[in-house]
Image (tube, helix red, strand yellow):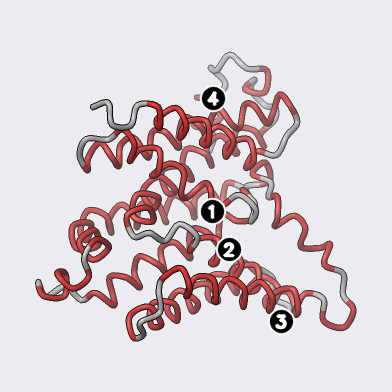
């Protein structure tokens, strides 16, 4: 981290000065790690027509947090990750083994998860307010250890993309064709949903449950408007998310607003800009 702090100290911002405001420097590094994660996942979420799945996983992660807190876990996030992966597995089973539409399945799991989370967190007359920070998030609270964990997840996701992207994309576009080509559709779908589950759960405390779905959907949706091929699609999604992420952090710092909300607003503006150029190439 010392190398990162030294590099940031060259930036022309007051918070970038040496030996000061380490929370902003940590947050900037977190944005550089988180936004590529969201950008990569976003393209698959958009192509799979699962725009609200990350929202459902956010609700399940909230329930996992509540279960972890009740069980006395030192790190409730671990319980939340496990619970979210279980929900991802059950969703994949329901989606593959029944004729239920994806949006219906997502709605069922989302409503059930949030209801269970509220039930558990208020059990015995407990106050729900201790979970309010999950709704808005606070990326300024991220620690170097958590950034390291995010970096490992990003590396694993990149490996997954390099080794399985074509198969996962074919599965997302046409499952019957993918199955006829010998692709293990169920496990590819589960691998994809589990990746979303892990990323959503771990980043939820920093970006906020209320906006995390938009952060995963908007980069890919914007890139889809102007990309001419798949490499451009992924590149624009990642770069768009990265630029809006850094700009959103700066806006939140100067205006005192929520960082997650600031990034989401800029991503929404970026989406509408790309919408103006859709169909002109």
Observer-side mark, 4 or 1, equals 1
- Whole-percent x, y for residue 217 in the image: 46, 49
The tag earlier along the polypeptide, 2 or 1, is 2
Question: How far is mark 2 from mark 1, CA to CA?
Answer: 8 Å
Q: Where residue 114 is drawn, which disc sits there?
A: none
- Whole-percent x, y for residue 123 in the image: 82, 81
The reply to whether discs 2 and 1 touch (Cβ–Cβ < 8 Å) is yes
Q: Where residue 213 is drawn, which disc sits there?
A: 1
Q: Where residue 58 is drawn, which disc sits there?
A: 2
Disc 1, SS: helix
In the shown orientation, is residue 73 left or right of residue 170? right
Question: How far is mark 4 from mark 1, CA to CA?
Answer: 30 Å
Furthest-top residue in view? 12
In the shown orientation, is residue 205 left or right of residue 245? right
Badge 4 local density, few (<14 within 10 Å), some, or many (20+)? some
Question: How far is mark 2 from mark 3, CA to CA?
Answer: 20 Å
Question: How far is mark 4 from mark 2, CA to CA?
Answer: 32 Å
The tag earlier along the polypeptide, 3 or 4, is 4
Name the residue that disc number 4 marks.
8
Question: How far is mark 3 from mark 1, CA to CA?
Answer: 28 Å
Observer-side mark, 3 or 4, equals 3
Badge 3 local density, few (<14 within 10 Å), some, or many (20+)? few
Residue 261, placed above or below residue 92: above
Name the residue that disc number 3 marks.
71
């Amino acid at each position: 981290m010392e190398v990162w702090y030294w590099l940031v100290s060259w930036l022309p911002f007051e918070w970038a000065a040496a030996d000061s405001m380490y929370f902003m420097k940590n947050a900037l590094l977190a944005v550089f790690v988180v936004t590529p994660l969201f950008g990569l996942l976003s393209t698959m979420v958009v192509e799979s027509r699962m725009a609200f799945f990350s929202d459902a996983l956010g609700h399940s992660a909230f329930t996992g947090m509540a279960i972890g807190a009740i069980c006395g876990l030192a790190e409730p996030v671990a319980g939340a990750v496990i619970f979210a992966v279980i929900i991802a597995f059950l969703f994949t089973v329901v989606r593959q083994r029944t004729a239920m539409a994806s949006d219906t399945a997502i709605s069922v799991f989302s409503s059930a998860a949030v209801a269970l989370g509220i039930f558990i967190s208020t059990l015995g007359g407990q106050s729900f307010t201790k979970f309010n920070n999950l709704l808005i998030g606070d990326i300024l609270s991220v620690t170097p250890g958590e950034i390291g964990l995010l970096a490992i997840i990003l590396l694993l996701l990149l490996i997954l993309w390099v080794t399985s992207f074509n198969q996962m994309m074919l599965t997302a576009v046409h499952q019957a064709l993918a199955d006829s080509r010998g692709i293990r559709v169920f496990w590819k779908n589960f691998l994809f949903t589990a990746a979303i589950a892990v990323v959503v759960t771990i980043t939820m405390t920093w970006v906020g449950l209320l906006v995390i779905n938009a952060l995963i959907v908007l980069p890919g949706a914007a890139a889809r408007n102007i990309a001419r091929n798949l490499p451009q699609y992924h590149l624009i999604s990642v770069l768009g998310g990265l630029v809006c992420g850094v700009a959103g952090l700066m806006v939140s710092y100067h205006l005192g607003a929520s960082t997650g909300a600031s990034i989401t607003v800029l991503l929404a503006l970026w989406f509408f800009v790309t919408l103006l150029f859709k169909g002109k190439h």
